[in-house]
Image (cartoon, rainbow, N blue to C red):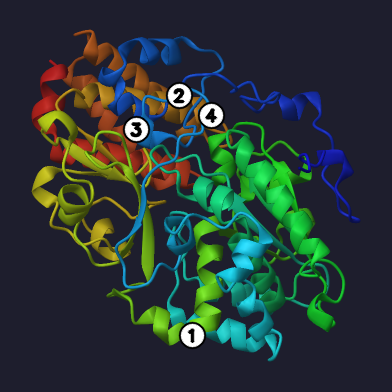
Amino acid sequence: MPAFPSPCHLPGNDVPRPLSADVKSFYHLPQHEHAGKACQGTACFAARHFNPARWTEAAAQSPRVYCLGECFAAPAKGQKKPRPPVKVFSPHGIVLGRIAAGGARTLAAYRASGGYAALGLAFTAPAERVLAAVDASGLRGRGGAGFPTGRKWRAVATQPAGQKYVVANADEGDAGAYIDRYLMEDDPHALIEGMILAAYAVGASKGYIYLRAEYPLAGVVLNAALAEARDAGWLGSRIGGTEFSFDLEVYLGHGSYVCGEETSLLRSIEGNRPEVMARPPYPTERGLFDRPTLVNNVETLVSVPWIVTQGGDAYAALGFSKSRGTKALSLNSLFNRPGLYEVEFGVTVRHIVEEIGGGLRDGGKLKGVLIGGPIIGMIPPHLLDTPLGFEELAAIGAGVGHGGVVAFDEHTSIPELVEHVFSFGAYESCGKCTPCRSGSGRVEKLFTHALAGQATKADLQECHELVTALKLTSLCGHGTGLARFAESILRYYPTEIEPCFK
């Protein structure tokens, strides 16, 4: 199968540069040192009592390795090639349907299940029809922010003609999330077709899939699928006999959680030091190589072929409120039924935990749930009846996020969880803004002192002030997300936090 392209050999006029020493120093895994390492991510932290020796190994490693996409088998170590259960609980398997049926890694398997029909349909009409379908669907970004996909696409489409890019954010680093991993490994052509449709809609001629280094099998599968698509005429010049041309490459990351933030990701592809950039201008206007760029995550793009073939209204008929369609969820190993599941928006968190997940293993008592990674608000047991929806979860200080569902039981001390999350936050901060660079490490230190019985009420007050600064002045979602997490802990778990500060 084709190997990963070297960053200095990608085709085109605007090409990524080889990593300089200064840029390489930014990354944790510049030589992909994660191979054979144990995971220190939050899903593995929550499951550390299942294998204490493995967690001890993970905690002692340098560099640290966060999230290998094996959260259903946590605590995890390396790519052991396990496969999670995959089921569809929504009326239509828009995202996970093919994977639940056994997957479609090859072009032949994808075509047999209706693949590339959306692209053939799109080429029979102007690009506006694709834009209108995405608008009507109500699709929102599945990478965490929940921004309306149609609005973002139109922002790129209305830029003057010229070089434009489409980038798939496949830097799935949120602990507990392994959705994109299996979409790429088991249904790669769905992502490719979604990206071609996006490029056709916005007028882009070049695309990149920014793949995290921790998913090596996904890279092999994607490159094989790209070769198939190119040989079949779905990539390259004059696709489908039209005047539209588009080509696509995989770019392999080097180990950095913050590269999931779109401005950091784009600078990484360019070969620059991937610190977060202030906005505006937004990438839709000045993105990759200073050209208009559309950035969507994998699940968002995989949803598009169904929307084009079935219609935006059919997609909008699913879900509820301002959260339309379906959402893929990945459940961690504390559940009786960990796995990858597609649900309709509007189901309650309780239904996800108790019915889909089957409750907790070994009769564990639920202490709380994180949906969408460690930098988002915790959902306490008394709020489990909250519906899965962008605004509904935000109203309780939580969020849909990426869709990784991490449960915690009585084996997790809340103060220890706070120390763990802020240790992760400090380690992964890009360092561009002071609140995140200094504040996250300071909160970690305060909770280290608290766990040692050396913290005071004044330290707790300082913690509150630091969280406020993170929320109001951080440059990107890394710092503000840490603040959301801390706010939810301070709000819902005071009886565990306050006794640690005497």
Residue 231 in percent (x, y) is at 82, 63
Circle on res. 466? 3
Q: Which amino acid does label 2 sit on?
A: Cys
Q: Would residue 220 be found to the left or right of residue 176 on screen?
A: right
Spatial CA distance of label 3 from label 2 is 28 Å
Residue 484 in percent (x, y) is at 31, 44
Callouts 3 and 2 close, C-beta under 8 Å: no
Which residue in the structure is indicated by mark 2?
39
In the rendered image, the residue lying farthest to the right is 13
Spatial CA distance of label 4 from label 2 is 11 Å
Relative vertical location of residue 151 with respect to residue 79 in this rendering, above or below: below
Q: What residue type is labelled 1?
A: Gly
Spatial CA distance of label 2 from label 1 is 41 Å
Q: Would residue 49 be found to the left or right of residue 106 on screen?
A: left
Which residue in the structure is indicated by mark 4?
79
Relative vertical location of residue 41 with respect to residue 103 in this rendering, above or below: above
